[in-house]
Image (spheres, rainbow, N blue to C red):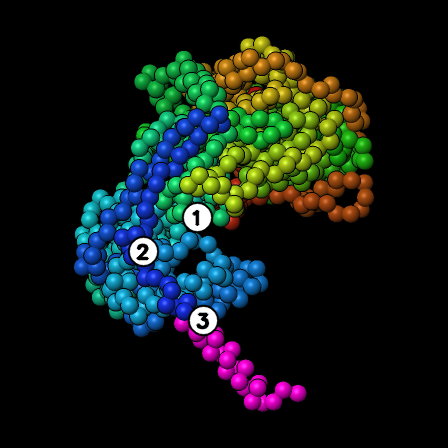
Amino acid sequence: MPSWKLVSGLSIFFFGSLVAMVGVAYAMVGIPSENDAAKSQNNVYYWSNGEQMVATGTGVNRQNVTIDQIPKSMQYAVISAENKSFYQDSGVDPTGIARALVNMARGGETQGGSTITQQFVKNTYLSQDQTISRKFKEMFISIKVGTKLSKSQILQGYLNTSYYGRGAYGIQAAARTYYGVDAVKLTDSQCAFLAALLKGPTYYDPAGNESLDSTATPKANRERSEERWSWILEEMHKDGHLTDAKYQTAIKKYPMPDGRKATKGMTGQISYLADTAKKYVLAHSDITEAQFDQGGYQIRTTFVKKDVNALSAAVKKIQKARLDPKKRDLDKNVQFGAASVVPNDGAIVALYGGDGYENGHFTNNADTSGVPVGSTWKPFVLAAAMEYGTAKTSPDGLSPLAKYNGNDNLKVKNADGSYYLNKDQSIFRQRNESDHAWGYITLRKAMEQSINTPFVQLGMDVGMTKVRDVAKASGILDASFSTLNPSFAIGTSTPSAIRMADAYSTFAASGKHTDPYSVTSVNHDGQPVPSFTKPAKATQAMPENVANNVTDTLENVIKNGTGKNALALGRTAAGKTGTTDSNKSAWFVGYTQQLSTSVAMFREDPKDHKLLSMNGTAGVESIHGGDIPTSIWTEYMKVALDGKSDSGFPDAEKIGVVDDESGAPSPTPTVSATPSETATESPSATPSETYESPTPTATDTCNAFNSWKCDSTDGGTDGGTTDGGTSSSPSATESTGTTTRGNGNGGLVTGGGNN
């Protein structure tokens, strides 16, 4: 055995070596300078062919100021909010670092454990990577900074290098950007607001930032910002940094900042293209928004210049021909959103996001949720029926030639034959547009003429969870789904135009789904960014023949039904029209084998961003998806497909059971004694899904995001609306947020009308 002298000697040697290593590491690190921080370069975006689209960021928006030019309230705001022991600590928080390291070792969240000193170091010297090695390096540098720089120098450096959003680095740029004043003139209240932004400007700027995250709506951001702003003021007051009188003055009114402004080069559709690409990069790499905005990135996009220009031109042409805001007030505040996706690939080749940042429209209408899709949802119901069948036909699927009851004011049944009841125990009834009675008709004919009642009952028979599953597999996001009730079958959900174009591309690709993407490569200073992930490979979302039969049915919509205006394309195409209750939105989504394109049209109140009726818009009684949206789609597709062959679609083989009585009432239908919210999807005794009843007829107090106002479980009055009432919207935790959109989509989640 080794002697104790040897053991103790080795221990002393190793301990001494460790101390020496720490000493060397400490000596080798330098002290960061705020003057070297945040040096900016351009970000350059390229079209799909490699041609430059736009260069953004001609120089970082930052001007350093000295500590005496920074109000005491700004200094104390960040101290009270982020590091109360700033003037007492050594510059590092050992407990916080240890906690962060343990989390990293466990594979959990790697953030946390940072003092103001450490944040200053991170802003100026290190990458934003959350790694163990960076934490150790940050600790050494922070300790050295804490011994070499005064607290005033550290605080000055931190406030001069922090990112406040809207491209503003440092307190002086932030003061000018948000309030149009120099930092020295900021009020106590404004200081607390700017300190709140440091939590994350994407989510705390009340102007919203839906181009990066759909939860960052203006209202949701305003609520988050106001909550943190008031908390910071309370902390400053508790910490003795604000007198009672100053606190009462500061807390009296939220200091709403100035609105966003378009940056150089970000005009027309370019602004929406660049922001869509930026959003994709941030979601598919470890690059932070602050890093990205410092520049030096080269982003190759999927956007085709010819197609983008064609889509914008199509919108403007039809808009000019059909709308006259000077002549008709009902033509004012009409908006469009559109997107075009390549089937079997997912590349977004074109989008139309709105009137442009330069016109104050900062919300990308192509990439945000909020506008119900109406009857364009019915193909997912049909696909679910063909794939899974009904309780009566299972395990066999149902044929599109099966007949369902197309009469108006239909009493809707659960899959077990009992009637679906409203909260007041009355039977829920579904209406058709114009109260038309069609009798028993095939699902193919019902799709052609966009009849509501067959698809509501079909959805109940198949099971709304199955409908949702098919839509989700096709690319619709969870956050877009509305409540699973009878109206779900006719389009109360609110996917974006991009997601609808992508979902229909699944039908075009014989059931293969690919996630939509807008970026093919990201370089930094000419070198590939290792963390950028490529688009996922295609998955089989539904059986080939199911998708092909949906396509065959949707071809008939254009040949003989509500989509006849698309015949002007002059080539094989499939598509579906959609119009919602009260005529608040109208859609057309259509595709060939080469391209899938969606077009949405809606009106919204510019003040509260709720959807408005389009009855009377364009001088007609009501707007339908087969009208203006289809005309825009056709104009665009003519140009986008010019020079491409008409390849048609694969033949659809016969599918499913043809049951002429599948939608007929039972001989003696029973009414549940209590509200029947459980539907049996198969003959087995196993319980299936639970439905929520549709809510009453919509009012303007219930919209796509404030779901707490959509809580009623009524199925609607016997008179009903075209959708049986509105459905509640996604929850506050889902990515559509909890409020109406900014200068874009939003408003009511109303139901699916015809056409």
Q: Residue furthest bottom?
A: 4
Q: Is residue 597 left or right of residue 617?
A: right
Foreground disc of the pair 3, 1: 3
Kind of residue at badge 2:
Ala
Which residue is labeled 1 in the image?
288
**Percent coordinates x, y for residue 547 in the rendering:** 69, 27
Foreground disc of the pair 1, 2: 1
Label 1 crowd (10 A; few <14 / some 14-19 / many >=20): some
Q: Residue at x 40, y 72 (%)?
A: 23
Q: Is residue 181 left or right of residue 110?
A: left
CA–CA distance in space, label 3 to label 2: 38 Å
Which residue is labeled 3 in the image?
21
Which residue is labeled 2 in the image?
195
Instruction: Name the foreground residue: 491 vs 647.
Output: 647
Q: Which residues are magenta?
A: 1-23
**Residue 172, visible in the rendered structure:** yes
Q: Does the segment drawn in magenta span residue 228?
A: no
